[in-house]
Amino acid sequence: MTEKAQILIVEDDLDLSEMLNAYFRVQGYEVLTATWGEDAVRMSQEFPLDLVVLDIRLPDIDGYEVARRLRSNRRTQNVPVIFLTEKRERMDKLTGLELGVVDYITKPFDIQELRLRVRNTLRRAEQTALTNPVTNLSEGPLIDEKLRDMLFQVSNWGVLSIAIDGLDKFRELYGFVAADDVMRAVTLMMNNAIREVGNESDFIGHLGPHEFVIITDNAKLATIRERIEVRIKQSMEYFYPLKDREKARQAMLENRLRLLVSQVVEKDGNFETVDSLKEAIVKSRVVK
């Protein structure tokens, strides 16, 4: 990892908490500590966490309840959790697994074993983070790598960007489920368009949380773009919950959800870096 991973240690034994804090800081991690479950939940909303090491026995709510709240919140639902506990019963472990806990270590433990479990968990999480959890499309460094390969290894390329503007406000009004459904629907439309009129080698990924990128060749770009634009605009009203269909029509008139489209082809410039290509994508955006 290029930046220090941030770990939250939730442990009411102050001596053990301080020891783990000092140990993992020496290992190169950023460490936060909490002794109460409610404090852990609050801190999980305030800080970007990469891992939670969580004791089951806490003075207020137990570790199971903390894990449930982490899993029920969109911000923390994918943060890996390692249970740290004195319990050995099979049902306790099963409960943890049902909550999506990735590992389970019993006190007293070997600190080197815990270090390796933390390291391995963070490595797995880093690989998972390269895929968007809603659409299952590649994002982050994988996109930069794909664009870089395109710039230096492919000729007559074309890049299409499709961004859903206003989705944050939409999420506030209608909830995470409705917003995620929009993202999945757009992903399906793009996949269908490429399957129907694109190439087998075409690529779809995320430039940003609400922005898609399609890599194709210049000859196919216009056809793919037209098909995607038409289908999304035809479906825009149905992105809203059925009970709010009339409100949806009003919202569409007010451009609450807008489609931002841009395209760049090889002949548009001498792109020497991925950043210069991204700048060109931003500059060419138009509202559809």
Image (cartoon, grey):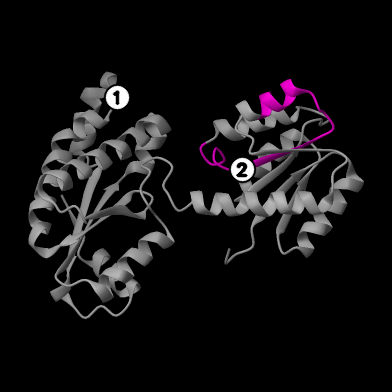
Residue extent of the magenta highlight: 74-96
Q: Which mark is residue 80?
A: 2
Residue 40: in sight, yes or no?
Answer: yes
Please give the name of the residue rendered at 60% of the width and 33% of the height, measured from the top-left corner. 100
Badge 2 marks a residue whose secondary structure is loop
The image quadrant where one finds the N terminus is bottom right
Badge 1 marks a residue whose secondary structure is loop
- Horizontally, is 110 left or right of 101 in the view? right
- Horizontally, is 127 left or right of 243 in the view? right
Q: Give the residue type that dot 1 points to.
A: Pro
Please give the name of the residue rendered at 8% of the width and 62% of the height, measured from the top-left corner. 219
Q: Residues within 10 Å of mark 2 (few under 14, many from 20)?
A: many
On screen, residue 72 above or below 42: above
The CA span between labels 2 and 1 is: 32 Å
Q: Please tell me whether residue 75 belongs to the stretch shown in magenta.
A: yes
The x, y position of residue 202, in whole percent, is: 21, 55
Residue under label 1, please give it: 241
Please give the name of the residue rendered at 10% of the width and 57% of the height, measured from the top-left corner. 220
Q: Please tell me whether residue 166 belongs to the stretch shown in magenta.
A: no
